[in-house]
Amino acid sequence: MANESEKMYTGDNIVQREMRMTNGTRNDSIVRGFALSSVFWLLIGLVIGLWLAAEMVYPSLNLAPWLAFGRLRVVHTNGLVYGFTLAGIFACSFYMLEKLTRTPLAFPGLAKAQLWLFNIAIALAALSLFAGMNTSKEYAELEWPLDIVVVVLWVMFAVNVMGTLVKRREKQMYVSLWFLVACVVTVAVVYILNNLAIPVSLTKSYSVYAGVNDANVQWWFGHNAVASVFTFPILAMFYYFLPKSTGLPIYSHRLSIIAFWSLVFGYLWTGAHHLMLTPVPEWIQTVALAFSLFLIAPSWASVVNGFYTMNGNWDKMKSNYLVKFFILGITFYGLQTIQGPTQAIRALSAHLHYTEYIPGHVHMGTMGWVTMIITASMYFMMAKISGREVHSVKLANIHFWLILVGQLLFTVTLWIAGIVQGAMWKAVNPDGSLKYTFLDSVAAMYPFWTVRLVGGLLYFAGIAVFAYNLYMTSRPKPGTKWSAAAAARSQAA
Amino acid sequence: MNVNSLYEKPVLFALAAVVVISVGTLVTTFIPLFLPSTQPVSPLFTPYTAVETEGRDIYIREGCNNCHTQTVRPLRAEVARYGDYSRAEESAWDRPFLWGSRRTGPDLARVGGKYPDAWHYRHMANPQAMFGKSNMPAYAWLAKAKLDTSLTARKVKVLGFGYDEAEVARQLAAFRRTVTAPTWPSAQERSRVTPAALRGELTELDALVAYLQKLGRDLMAAQRAAAGPGTAEAAEKKNPYAGNRTAGEEGEKIFEENCKVCHGEKGAGGFGPKLATTKHKFGGTDADLFTTVSGGRPGGMPSFLQPLGKDRIWKVITYIRRLESESR
């Protein structure tokens, strides 16, 4: 038994062993390139988000066809999912891969090509969506030529991930690497299967699935895109960067094993909770509901693991500027994974689905969990690869409070708005007639939408501070070991 | 085999992950692809015409599905607001499906035939002119864009709608003749929003309106046919509020919210007929007016029985009687 438990805890040894390694990775420029690309697309995506929030209140801002809400919303979601989040995942993955395998990337040239192709693809994606070339399937709006580019990019990434893992010098794979592999595999499967379409021209295609099946496949994809982009790799970052920035090993390796497999197993069953009370067969809805509730357990296993890691060291929340990002981030992940499953319950879905409650829910996950973890990971990583401390801890703290307050103002307002909206939609008079017209329910939303816009502005201010702080941190410090090493390396090459 | 060895073999680990994600995928997504319940077909629901297909693609291009759903849930208030709940058969021809996920605007699954075409032309051109509190973007520019039909035949073929290129051309020509005829009921409103150069052509707005008018129509036609004639509320013959002043004032408010958009300020007329008159299009007795408002009439008068209820309908009729007397 002693032997087994020792083996179970080797995950911590990997992180500790890795801690003794020198700063930086072999491919700092690629990591930096993806990190700065990520921040660039984050800023663009948020500006578009602000414009959309303003359009809700002032419809005259729909100034041109390409600025109309229907087109712009798609640029916002795709820009942030594929531009910001994927680039952030690529940056952190390459960094973690090198560190946790104690091996340089298997194919650095491929990674560099991936960086260029990625930015070209995102720019083309934005332009094509502005132009109205979209398939209408949420988060899978890109038309088929760009779908092919996305698949190529993913294969490039997968080759580096698997290649580096095969070549690795560290015997065991740490939990972050499992989540990375799960991300690679799941994105590949759901993206390809949901985007199967028959082209009629270069910019137009029709889904191979029809009606109910198209809906069912789409939300199987939609939900697992969330799992494999907003959950698996972000958990990978959490499991790596929290121990790294605190020096504390993850509380339980055994718990992370159970959490990993049950999370990865359970997620794929839940897509139809986006289709409650629609014509999708009822049993598929009910299975989705059951597995949605089941998912609370593995999700909270990670939350518990995070909190217990801090056990006895909570003073670090104050002394270490990064810890609060990770702990608040995992807290929002915990709230998100309680709120999501409750929304799947039919009675609550009946009230909340299609209302502002849903964007409220999504934005707690993205603005609270995903962005908190990615931005904190980037501070840590960028300081390491540029051989200096973060440019300003004070600015990082300002960034933290602005995005925290901005996000809470945004999401809590939308939850209340959604509850009000749902109540107005279903309010009936004693004779069974409707109490409110649809327009009454729109008019009731304007105060909420205005507050949401204010929340968004605060949040954007926080991200602007982050972008500046990260950029200043990313400049190589003259006269340090890092810049000398970098110079030597570039001379050798 | 040591359990931990899985974490030492990346390729095996990746394969294990594939197996684990495949179980739920197979059960909830792959197997259902082949079940009858996910692909029911009914002859009651017809594929889209060539023009409607183009309109649907404009709906997709403009991302209308980001604010409008197209699925009515089997919930009491929802059926009262929009119409009967959505059936699987209705989406059989939909590639992609357009059920949506958010109702910033109302559901559109039952909008077909609810309003006259003229209503849509005016609304799309400037929603705020009709509903001051609306936040819908204006789509006036769709009327200024000629409809591109170069791919229509290929689209219809890929979608398997079962008619050929000649039929596509025939449909497009026939539709163009219809909407460009000066005698077309919505001709005046169409000409108002369409630039002179395009009045004789098909515009993108023409196609979009045609598509909207298709939504839910097959189901409603089937239900009308099944129900047969003469199912209107026969029992309601006499206005319980006749001459009641407060009821008339309440009726005025209901009128402002629900009727004014079509019937004009103080019932002066608009898309809908003038109401400040004693000569009503479908008869002027209490029973006639109640039947018209509760059950709707062909040509764009929606049914208000479900959303308003009998009580409020009688109050509106009380207000209409006041308009009649003021018009004398």
Image (tube, helix red, strand yellow):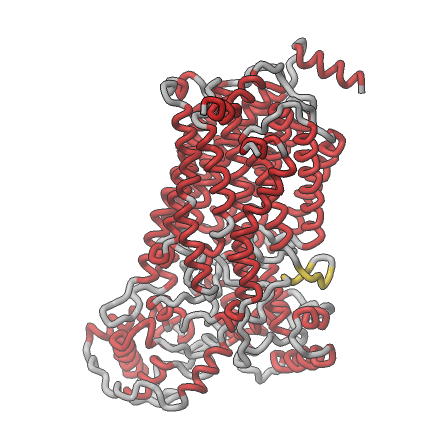
Which residue shows up at 59% across the image and 75% down it? B47
Choose top left, top right, bottom left or bottom right for residue B152. Answer: bottom right
Which residue shows up at 53% across the image and 38% down it? A232
**Split into 4 quadrants, where in the image is the N terminus of chain B?**
top right
Percent coordinates x, y for residue A121 in the rendering: 69, 43
Percent coordinates x, y for residue A94 in the rendering: 64, 29
Percent coordinates x, y for residue B170 in the rendering: 70, 81
Above-or-below relation of B295 to A340: below
Above-or-below relation of A415 to A115: below
The residue at the far top in this view is A479
Above-or-below relation of B245 to B288: above
Which residue shows up at 25% across the image and 70% down it? B250
Question: Which of A151 and B291 lies nearest the eye of the viewer?
Answer: A151
Percent coordinates x, y for residue A70 in the rendering: 55, 55
**Split into 4 quadrants, where in the image is the C terminus of chain B?**
bottom left
Choose top left, top right, bottom left or bottom right for residue A33. Answer: top right
Question: Which of A150 and A7 lies nearest the eye of the viewer?
Answer: A7
